[in-house]
Image: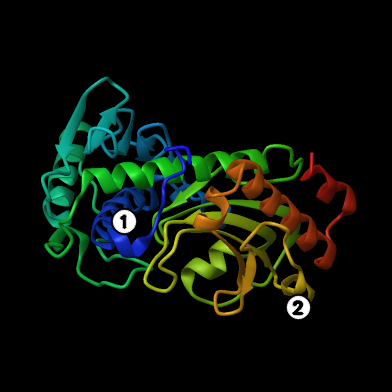
Amino acid sequence: MPASWPSASYEQWSATCDTLHAHAQVLGKLAVRLAPPEPQLQHAALRLTARGWETLPLPAPDGSGSFVVALDLHAHEAVVEHSGGRSERIPLTPHRAVGSVTRELLGAIAQLAGQVHIDPTPQEVHWTVRLDEDDEHATYDTGQVASYFAAATQAALVLADYRAPFRGRSTPVNAWWGSFDLAVSLFSGRQAVPPSGDFIMRNAMDAQEVAVGWWPGDPRHPQAAFYAYAHPAQEDFSTYQPAAPGAHWDAALGEFILPWDDVRTTDDPHATAVGFARSLFLRACEVCDWDPQLAATGDG
């Protein structure tokens, strides 16, 4: 198999994964605090770039311009870059605790762009320690990070290819720091009732959509996988059988799953994953009564 489609099992790198996830949460908290609010919480999303996880340009608190914060997964550093040309780099190795990195990162932002205060409470994770006091997450294996980044890059390319032809409103390939996944949402243009009243759900899921994504696994589902779901959910959606090997409906998660190991071992992993995404999008549009002309653009 090509080295660019490596194995990805949460069980094998859970300690490093959780540390990297916690670092990503700090970037997300900065976006939440500083970026202008957008529908479906799009302002809070990060991006996966050629060097790692990054914020979009954020307004400097002191009014001096903008700045970007990145997790450079080649140099293994947290990076702050100001639009004026100044920058600071904070090492993530050797095995530095999240709390130490967070405090140093916020200090670097204060020097370059002005003081910013974030909510240090982690979200959508199985731990509760504050990000700026987190001495629990300090494991950082550079080889495991490189394997994750190679896998995530291929997944992001799949999602970008799947999204490209759609003529309606859609998101870019978002890197979500709460659930630590990559995802694309395509929207029908209709409103929807959120599945619950909590802050994230009522703001992120108030429109009809089909979401396709990839995540490296977590304690609930320890294997990396692509996933797809429709909102609002329709019973007929779950009865579909995708052609991709290993793809199946997971009733506990409420979404279709395509295990990473099943797709990466095919003759053409990229085409297999894109086919999985497009077939489920078309199925969702059919059972959820989308405009047929709009739905057809999702297949090119």
| Between 47 and 80, the one nearer to me in the picture | 47
Q: Identify the element where label 1 is drawn.
A: helix
Q: Which mark is residue 173?
A: none
Residue drawn at (16%, 38%), measured in percent from left and top? 90
180 relative to 262 in the view: left or right: left
| Between 88 and 272, the one nearer to me in the picture | 272
| Between 9 and 192, the one nearer to me in the picture | 9
**Image position, residue 115 (x, y; %):** 20, 43
245 relative to 49 in the view: left or right: right
**Image position, residue 276 (x, y; %):** 68, 54
261 relative to 23 in the view: left or right: right
The C terminus - image quarter = top right
Q: Label 2 is placed on what type of residue? A: Glu
Q: As drawn, which residue projects farthest toward the top?
A: 85
| Between 2 and 56, the one nearer to me in the picture | 2
Q: Label 1 is placed on what type of residue? A: His
Q: Quadrant of residue 241?
A: bottom right
Q: Read off the residue under disc 2.
A: 235
Q: Identify the element where label 2 is drawn.
A: helix
User: Is there a contact, CB below 8 Å, between mark 1 and mark 2?
Assistant: no
Q: As drawn, which residue projects farthest toward the right?
A: 292
Residue drawn at (70%, 46%), measured in percent from left and top? 169
Q: Read off the residue under disc 1.
A: 21
Residue 243 vertical placement versus 6 (above, below): below
